[in-house]
Image (cartoon, rainbow, N blue to C red):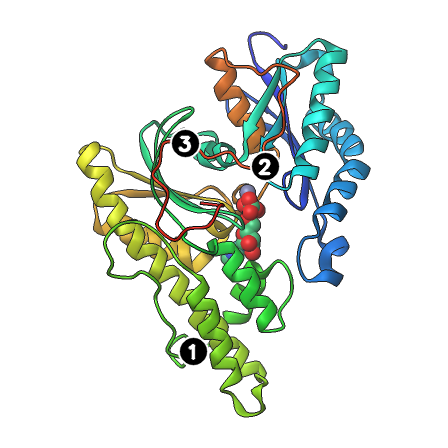
């Protein structure tokens, strides 16, 4: 440890990014390296778990050395070593957890297993220093949830998706439109200049009570729209219009559900005023603008971390670990990686929802 500063190294390997960062408890990101496995997975048009796990194994050691070098610290300066302990692709999670445990054992450091979703959920406290409680829209490739964040490890889930996550819908729609992977940025790029009103696409769940989401019907509507085109093949203009229409429909649906969540949040915490958006889809510019308008209309402020800290990274894992360390929370070296790890285990299951809810 340097002076009284607590410095933590965080490892993220639950999906297709191998990421390592060094962060201190004064909210300073000292280094942040992210290696994306885009090339490895591109030929398959999606993430292949076995390939992801092997790629994490190949790259993690080198990235840890780089993150320490960039931050100009050594293992002896660290207060702890953290890794995503789940939820995620279990092979990749195990690579990160095992590596962190080995370093913790060899260097006699505390080990912290971080819930990946808590990493996303607490990022706004790293980037903006906000206080609890706040309302969180967590939109990523694997999850789509509305949560009240009451404290570290204290979440009330107001809604979740009954089928696809928002990012998953972007990825599947991109594939359907012949755009690249990952789909979110590709759809957003293709949508520039597109006419969002040309195709009449549904706004899933809009106007319904509650805060649950659904995106598989929207994805299917895009497929029908493509099949209805002459020859069943979209031109570049068709792709732009469909991408714009899809992106707008997702934003409209997310805003509608978040509006309901604001009411529930306000019932519980009348004077709280912060809406946070986090997770990979929070990098979407249209969504950020729409949520900003919603927040303003409700007398709230929107806090959105910079896009590079919305998508998966090690800084959010190191930060969540720092938050836990400050409360005296660490994990034993026999911690087992968790494929599923809900933030609010007491939330009632959403009707018709699959296991990922
Ligand atoms: O949080 P994240 O990096 O990984 C998970 O925990 O899932 O989120 C990845 C997801 C992918 O589905 C990706 O297509 C989506 O975030 N995404 C976006 C954008 N950038 C990434 N979706 C919409 N617009 C974007 N600009
Ligand atoms: Zn994530």
Q: Is residue 68 above or below residue 242?
A: above
Return the mark for residue 345: 3
Res. 111 image quadrant:
top right
Position of residue 103 measured from the top left corner of the image (x, y, whole percent): 74, 18
- The residue where tag 2 is placed is 339
Q: Nearer the viewer, residue 171 or 314?
A: 171
Mark 2 and mark 1: Cα distance apart in space: 40 Å
Q: Residues within 10 Å of mark 3 (few under 14, many from 20)?
A: few
Q: Earlier in the sequence, mark 2 or mark 1?
A: 1
Return the mark for residue 195: 1
Res. 78 image quadrant:
top right
Position of residue 127 measured from the top left corner of the image (x, y, whole percent): 47, 34
Q: Is residue 294 left or right of residue 86?
A: left
Residue that appears at 34% across and 66% down: 203
Mark 3 and mark 2: Cα distance apart in space: 14 Å
Q: Earlier in the sequence, mark 1 or mark 3?
A: 1
Question: Of circles 2 and 1, which is in front?
Answer: 2
Residue furthest to the bottom:
230
């Amino acid at each position: 440890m340097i002076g009284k500063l607590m410095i933590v190294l965080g490892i993220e390997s639950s999906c297709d990014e191998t990421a390592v960062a060094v962060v201190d408890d004064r909210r300073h990101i000292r280094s942040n390296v992210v290696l994306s496995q885009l090339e490895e997975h591109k030929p398959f048009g999606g993430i292949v778990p076995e390939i992801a796990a092997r790629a994490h194994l190949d790259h993690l050691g080198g990235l840890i050395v780089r993150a320490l070098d960039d931050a100009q610290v050594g293992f002896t300066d660290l207060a702890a070593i953290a890794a995503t302990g789940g939820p995620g692709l279990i092979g990749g999670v195990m690579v990160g957890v095992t590596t962190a445990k080995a370093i913790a054992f060899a260097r006699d450091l505390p080990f912290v297993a971080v819930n990946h979703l808590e990493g996303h959920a607490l990022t706004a406290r790293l980037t903006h220093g906000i206080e609890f409680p706040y309302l969180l829209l967590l939109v990523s490739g694997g999850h789509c949830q509305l949560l009240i964040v009451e404290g570290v490890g204290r979440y009330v889930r107001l809604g979740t998706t009954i089928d696809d996550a928002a990012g998953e819908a972007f990825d599947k729609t991109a594939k359907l439109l012949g755009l690249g992977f990952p789909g979110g940025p590709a759809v957003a790029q293709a949508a520039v200049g597109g006419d969002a009103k040309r195709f009449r696409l549904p706004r899933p769940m809009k106007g319904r009570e509650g805060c649950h989401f659904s995106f598989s019907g929207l994805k299917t509507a895009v497929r029908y729209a493509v099949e209805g085109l002459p020859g069943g093949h979209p031109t570049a203009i068709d792709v732009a219009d469909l991408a714009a229409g899809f992106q707008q429909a997702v934003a409209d649906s997310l805003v509608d559900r978040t509006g309901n969540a604001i009411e529930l949040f306000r019932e519980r915490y009348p004077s709280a005023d912060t809406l946070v958006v986090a997770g990979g889809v929070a990098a979407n510019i249209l969504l950020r603008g729409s949520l900003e308008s919603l927040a303003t209309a409700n007398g709230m402020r929107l806090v959105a971390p910079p896009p590079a800290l919305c998508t998966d990274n090690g800084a959010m894992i190191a930060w969540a670990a720092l938050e836990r360390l400050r409360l005296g929370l660490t994990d034993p070296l026999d911690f087992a990686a968790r494929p599923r790890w809900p933030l609010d285990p007491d939330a009632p299951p959403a009707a018709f929802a699959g296991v990922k809810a």
